[in-house]
Image: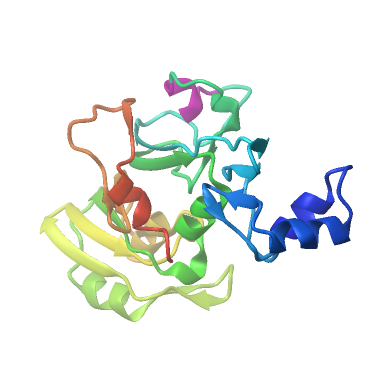
Amino acid sequence: MRLDRFLSNLPRFNRQDVRQLLASGRVRVDGQVSRDGRDQVRVFSCIELDAEVLQAGKAARYFMLHKPVGVVSATEHPEHRTVLDLLDAPDKHELHLAGRLDLNTSGLLLITNDGQWSRRVTAPSGKQPKVYLVDSEDPIDPACIEAFARGLYFRFEDLVTRPAELQILAPRQARLTLYEGRYHQVKRMFGHFQNKVVGLHRLSVGAIQLDERLCPGQYRALTAEEIAGFANH
């Protein structure tokens, strides 16, 4: 919320008090004096008045997980183990998923408690590339390359998919780059050519690549550089 609203919500201050506090430079946001009531206050912001801490601010947390097959992309599930069950992190109930992978899809999954950051990761308008390794039941028809680049019509949504890049690596394996995330999109695209996807593994989202040192089920904190990759998208 706005800084002036945050201060006005405190019982001891009215709007006139807030204007005076800001004008006098007595309010600091994350260590910096703020005189603009329009400045945004987040749950991670430290707000101080003189030497008094009005909001300590939570620590923002960001993880990459190598999701295994058979684990649900959810925070809780009545039947299956979830990705949060794989994390040994304090207050993990505060975390959520920045995107999802199907039960039988493995690979890079991003987990955070920063809602604004995760919205940038998953925003349809962001057009962040998502790269997958695809294994198919039958040999991949080279015609898929042009068809995927042109876009396929999805009748259920009545839309044409965004252009996608397909690189055939072996007769039954390819690298696919998508710029959106439709329901079961990869399986439906290959299904257009009557070819079943038997293995799907996400390699990267935007500039964040799955750490090859992570075994399925393992995770690590994102680096500052990886986090910043979605700071302005």
Q: Quick one: quadrant of the N terminus? A: bottom right
Q: Is residue 197 visible?
A: no
Q: What residue lies at 63% left-to-right and 23% top-to-bottom?
A: 78
Q: Is residue 168 visible?
A: yes
Q: Name the spot of residue 35 as percent of width and height, x first.
A: 64, 63
Measured along the vertical axis of the image, is residue 70 above or below residue 1? above
Measured along the vertical axis of the image, is residue 230 above or below residue 151? above
Q: Name the spot of residue 24 as percent of width and height, x first.
A: 69, 59
Looking at the image, residue 200 sits to the left or right of residue 111; the answer is left
Q: Name the spot of residue 135 as percent of width and height, x first.
A: 23, 48
Q: What residue lies at 34% left-to-right and 76% top-to-bottom?
A: 163
Q: Name the spot of residue 121 as percent of width and height, x first.
A: 45, 56
Observer-nearest of 54 and 110: 54
Observer-nearest of 21 and 152: 21
Q: Which residues are magenta?
A: 80-87
**Corner quadrant of residue 62:** top left
Looking at the image, residue 104 sits to the left or right of residue 195; the answer is right
Q: Is residue 85 magenta?
A: yes
Looking at the image, residue 19 sits to the left or right of residue 169; the answer is right
Q: What residue lies at 46% left-to-right and 37% top-to-bottom?
A: 61
Observer-nearest of 68 and 17: 17
Q: What residue lies at 57% left-to-right and 56% top-to-bottom?
A: 33
